[in-house]
Amino acid sequence: MIQDINQQQPGVNKIRAQKTIGIQVGAESFMDEGVEQVLDILQEKGAINTLYVSTFSYDRGIQGRPAVNYADHGIQESDRDRYHGGNYATPHAEFYKNTRIKGELLKAPDFGDVDILEKVIPAARRRRMKVFASVQDGFNYPADVTIFKDFSEINLGGEKGGAMCFLAPDVREFWKAVSVDLCTSYDIDGILLFNERGGPFLNALGASHNQSIQSSNVTCFCEHHQKMAALHNIDLERVKEGYRQLDTFVKGSLSGNRPSNGYYVEFERLMFAYPEIYAWNQIFDIGKSQVLADVYEAVKKVNKNQQVGFHIEHVNSFNPFYRATRSYEDMAKIADFLKVVVYNNCGGERYASFIRNAGSIVFRDIPVDELMRFNNYLLGYSEDEASMTGLATAGLSPDYVYRETQRALAGVRGQRCDILPGIDINIPVGRNSRVQSPDDAYAATLAALKAGAQGVLLSRKYSEMKLANLEAAGRAVREAASLRIEPSSNRFNFY
């Protein structure tokens, strides 16, 4: 067991003094393999100096063991049937007095009374590792967790949706309470907050890589949104009618009912007729941004030295409509760091899925290969990225990682906000998609660091990572530590 990696490996010492080398890891890994053994592996193979412990979540994206393609460490079976989720630390009732969502009732039952932060923090501190608590606003709530349903979004038909409404005062207070509880009760270095929800306009168009197109179920039309509409002088009835018309357009497009002027012109005509459609999407973004700002301000009141960071979802790098709604400069004002997802290995499959969605509605008149090339130009991708036909198999290139990292660094406009690109290590992909190699993990990690990032965050979770790929990422970290990196172009050359 290595107690202090600084004394053992000078190269790591240098990179740690300058860079955050983080990894997302859930309670299941520490419980399955043991805290000391996991930390040994993370330091020795991955050069990790910062843990992002998945502490509050009901989503298996950052927690739980993989369902298939087991990693070469830990228990070789899925925990899907046993996974519950919740708070894997210990919630304290006094922090939840201002919300009806009582955090003390949301202790994760998966490992009984075990408090994962109590187990991990002392061992991490002995190794001079930083510890962040990851908090995720997911919406895969188990059937026995009913309290969230009282604060659900309301869809266009008046039915409850699956996620909680950002504008509900109890919801805003709840996310503040979770974060303040963790930052007050534990010797942690800060919070990483996850939220991958898009607004009604983008959701209606299936404008992500991982969603079906369900334009009839867009949200939210609850009482809090109605009050917000009045505050901003938005006619709620025109909003609803606009979204009904958008629903009709989407369904017609999916059925191949081409308007006489084409799909795109008909779409733009609808947007001109109902500007309330996009205004309503902006209301969603206001609510989402306010939750982020709430958490940042609340944590800084506890301890100004604790850091707050936000996970920036993958669709931000594929979708120009979505990208236009997310300003790195604005987010940098309420964040100490941004984890910008640049998952290139699974990115080919994800990007192809987004293009198929986009090409089935608004851009249905454009052949899908031409649509992807057009979108590449809009996004500033290299001309060398794979064609649509081979995109899933090829993945996106290390150059994509480099360019997206540089875009984020430029986007914060010199503010004190670190950019930590999220590097994918063995994220599950489809049957015909690229199987990650150590060279892939090495190239992506090195690309992010050569682009000038203040660190990297290996993702999604340690429990699904192959050790050879983790070690390859660590090799890139150590190599980058020995280089003087001065990014001077918008292109990354690996070979």
Image (cartoon, grey):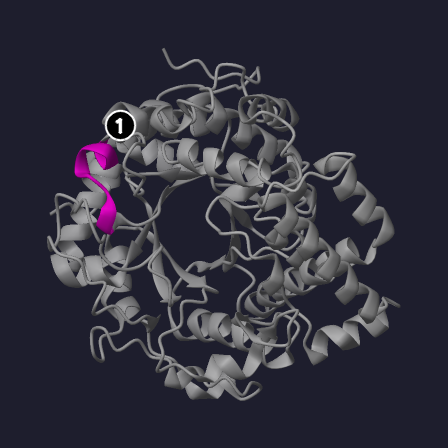
In the current view of this chain or complex, which residue is farthest to the top? Answer: 495
Q: Give the residue type that dot 1 points to.
A: Arg
Nearest the camera: 84 or 13? Answer: 84
- How many C-alpha atoms fall within 10 Å of the one at disc 1: few (<14), some, or many (≥20)? many
464 inside magenta stretch: yes
Query: Does residue 9 lie above or below 177 as drawn?
Result: above
Q: Which residue is drawn at 43% across and 83% down?
A: 146
Q: Where is residue 409 in the image (x, y as percent from the top left)?
A: 59, 34
Q: What stretch is highlighted in magenta?
A: 463-471
Residue holding disc 1 = 475
Query: Does residue 94 lie above or below 242 as drawn?
Result: below
Q: Is residue 375 something one can see in this rendering?
A: yes
Q: Which residue is drawn at 53% across and 22% down?
A: 369
Q: Which residue is drawn at 35% across and 82% down?
A: 144
Q: Where is residue 201 in the image (x, y as percent from the top left)?
A: 67, 54
Q: Where is residue 25 in the image (x, y as percent from the top left)?
A: 29, 54
User: Is 137 on the left-hand or right-hand side of 488?
Assistant: left
Residue 239 position by quadrant: bottom right
Nearest the camera: 393 or 238? Answer: 238
Quadrant showing the C terminus: top left
Q: Main secondary structure of the magenta part?
A: helix
